[in-house]
Amino acid sequence: MYSLAIHGGAGTIRRETMTPAIEAGFHAGLRTALLAGHAVLARGGSAMDAVTAAVMALEDDPQFNAGRGAVYTSAGTHEMDAAVMDGRDRAAGAVAGILGPLHPVLAARAVMEHSEHVLLIGPGALAFCRANGVEFTNAAHFHTERRWQALQAELARRTAAAADTRSDADRHGTVGAVACDAAGNLAAATSTGGMTGKLPGRVGDSPVIGAGTWADNATCAISATGHGEFFIRHAVAHEIASRMRFLGEGVAEAAEKVVAELGALGGSGGLIAVDAAGNVALPFNCDGMYRGRIGADGRALTAIYREAPAAHG
Ligand code: ASP
């Protein structure tokens, strides 16, 4: 049974500032991405193509911190990270610190498909993308006023040495997708602008295989979101796969345990996971996580806070 899950970042707008219109916008954005991925799976496409299609849709949507709508570094620039992994053979590709490719997830896919490497960064990654036909756009495409203002507020806070009272949503965000296709193959894709006000050169967990992105048919596919430094130090995605392999835990049990453990250590965030039977888990340890799932019945179920995913629209 095929299934697909997506996230649009852990750490949601606080309930006090959420309006019905903003909420509806997030549900609609998630739904569009779910349907894009589902269309691939429904015509017998691969999990890899499905997660790529879903993440491209989320990168195009300025509500989410990836592609258009990415957050700014402390220098007022954009540096994006992305990764893909194929559960059939653990093939993987990733990019970090890039600005230019319209869809960073396609840059990651190009690394997987056209190079002998797993992770390319900065100027070298961009040169590789140009040589391999990845579509570029101008820097203005990625700008959003909301992210620019979030950076200005953060820089002012640092100057004043004031306490950090931002919501998780103002700090970070990411998009991701995991899928199990009709053949039982798994894939994962993750794409992010990283964390608001990050130092130029900082790389988060998203493009680090085994931290923010993972896929292995024998266990699960995972795309994580949250405070990346914690996810790297705890090798979160690989830790979940290891629990499944060595302890025999199911995907939901393993994912929930690791996310709870991380939360207890101060690492806010969550993740989406799927196993080769199509079982999905969407755990998080903060207020909310933009998320959704869809199966063979084609019903797009989405959620933002603690509620169970439901049909919206
Ligand atoms: N994990 C991302 C990073 O640290 C941010 C996020 O998912 O919210 O770059």
Image: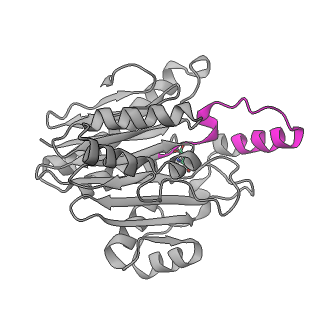
Viewer-proximal residue among 18 and 11 = 11
At x 48%, y 25%, the residue is: 23
At x 50%, y 48%, the residue is: 234
At x 23%, y 41%, the residue is: 248
Taking 150 as reference, is 128 left or right?
Answer: left
4, above or below 89, in the image: above
**Residue 105 on the magenta segment:** no
Viewer-proximal residue among 142 and 248 = 248
Where does the image place residue 303, in percent across and percent down from the top left? 39, 26
Residue 278 occupies quadrant: top left
The kind of secondary structure the magenta stretch mainly shows is: helix
296, above or below 71, in the image: above
Q: Is residue 59 visible in this depiction of the protein?
A: yes
Residue 139 occupies quadrant: bottom right
At x 79%, y 31%, the residue is: 163
Quarter of the figure that contains the C terminus: top left
**Outermost residue, bottom side:** 131
Where does the image place residue 152, in percent across and percent down from the top left? 77, 43
Taking 162 as reference, is 48 left or right?
Answer: left
**Which residues make up the magenta segment?**
149-174
Q: Is residue 176 visible in this depiction of the protein?
A: no
15, above or below 86, in the image: above
